[in-house]
Amino acid sequence: MAEQQDIDGAIEHIYSAAADPAAWQQALDAINALYPGGCTALLHHDAAAGSGTCARFSGWDTAAIRSYNAYYGARNPRFAGLERWPVGVAATAESMFDHAELLKTEFYNDFLRPLDLPDGLGVTLAQDHARFVRFSVLYPEATGREQDRNVAVLQRLTPHLQRAMQLNRQLQQAHVRWQAAEATLNGIVHGVFIVDGQGRILFTNRAADRILREKDGLDLGRDGVLRPAAGDGAELARKIRALAQPLDAAPGEVAPEHVALVRRRSERRPYSLLILPLRIPEGPFVAAGGLAAIFVFDPEARRRPALEPLARSFDLTRAETRLLGVLLEGCGLVDAATLLRISPHTAKTHLRHLFEKMQCSRQAEIVQVAAQHPAWIIADER
């Protein structure tokens, strides 16, 4: 009964690690406690590269792990037959590699024997071609006398270890995708809001944060709902509810109802809003009314493309880049020369180089080429 409780406790720690990778240490410690004198480890082995490393461990001396990762991991003879061993099946170390042959190896004599870890068992948790993720337990001879029990315990833990690793991987992939999406949205100049069907804000990019701080055209209500800063917000709320359609609705093209104008307190030209429904997988934490993305365009903002990416793309000098920046502001060549405090002749020379490098023949073409460059998406706002 006591051992059953210890196993159940180890499983609980494993699922804690599934949600929080930082909790793997507690999980390994709990498993290691099931094997007296044992040392547990999560190992990564690449058969094609002939390498093996320990990712996480319990019971091991840190110096031994460093030695394993630096040298002995690539010389572990038990990895030789991993391709032939089924994933998810726990097995003793002796069944994977003949013990008499092991005693002749450098791995045993210089690594295992000094640590008094002659016996053990392991299981492949995942395999991707020639790459393996292994869970290994090594222990003294006394613990090895109960191999049937040892294998049974690890076999019981194996599906939980596999599921926890799958969840870790899925969460990591989702986190990477979210970070990439957030970085992308923060890099553009237009405001982006993600809202639920009631208009409650779930995400804002940097430009949207700036719009809210200004409280000129859009504001955040006490209930977290996006609303116009001036006038009645009923029309905007109606559009959001209508466009944050049920998740099984067929996607449609941008239509007039996707667009809204929001007046501003400053009496500057109104914001233009593009409201698009978002379709995401159904789940218990998804808002019942759907989600929508709201893109906010400010006709008063003066923007020009980020010049550094343009300069790198076309191999422009600093002087050529400065001239390009002024031309993109709408200046003619003479005015540009005056602003840059260079002679008209020098300005013409720089312009000729811009024509050559950007493969243009007229100033209007330079603007067109710059407008098609990704640098315009991450434009500088002034």
Image (spheres, helix red, strand yellow):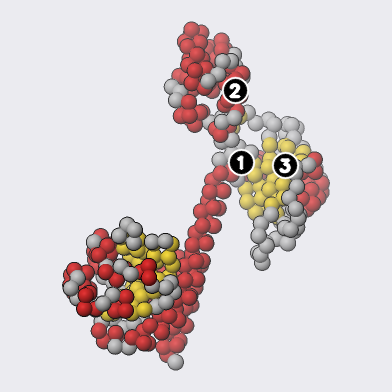
Please give left or right for residue 109 compared with residue 245 in the image.
Answer: left
Q: Residue furthest bottom?
A: 1
> Are dots 1 and 3 in contact, CB under 8 Å?
no
Residue 159 coordinates in the image, percent (x, y): 48, 75
Is 151 above or below relative to 206?
below
The answer to which of 207 and 345 lies nearer the viewer is: 345
Of pointers 2 and 3, the one earlier in the residue sequence: 3
Q: Quadrant of the C terminus?
A: top right
Three-letter amino acid code at the position of disc 3: Leu
Quick one: label 3, few (<14), some, or many (20+) residues within 10 Å?
some
Count the marks: 3
Residue occupying image coordinates x 26% and y 69%: 77
Cα–Cα span, label 1 and label 2:
24 Å
Question: N-terminal of the two: label 1 or label 3?
Answer: 1
Residue identified by numbered label 3? 274
Q: Which mark is residue 207?
A: 1
Secondary structure of residue under mark 2: helix
In this view, the mark in front (2 or 3): 2
Residue with the mark numbered 2: 367
Residue drawn at x 37%, y 87% is 149
Q: Position of residue 11 (x, y in %)?
A: 47, 78
User: Residue 258 at what x, y percent from top left?
Assistant: 76, 43
Alpha-carbon span between mark 2 and mark 3: 26 Å
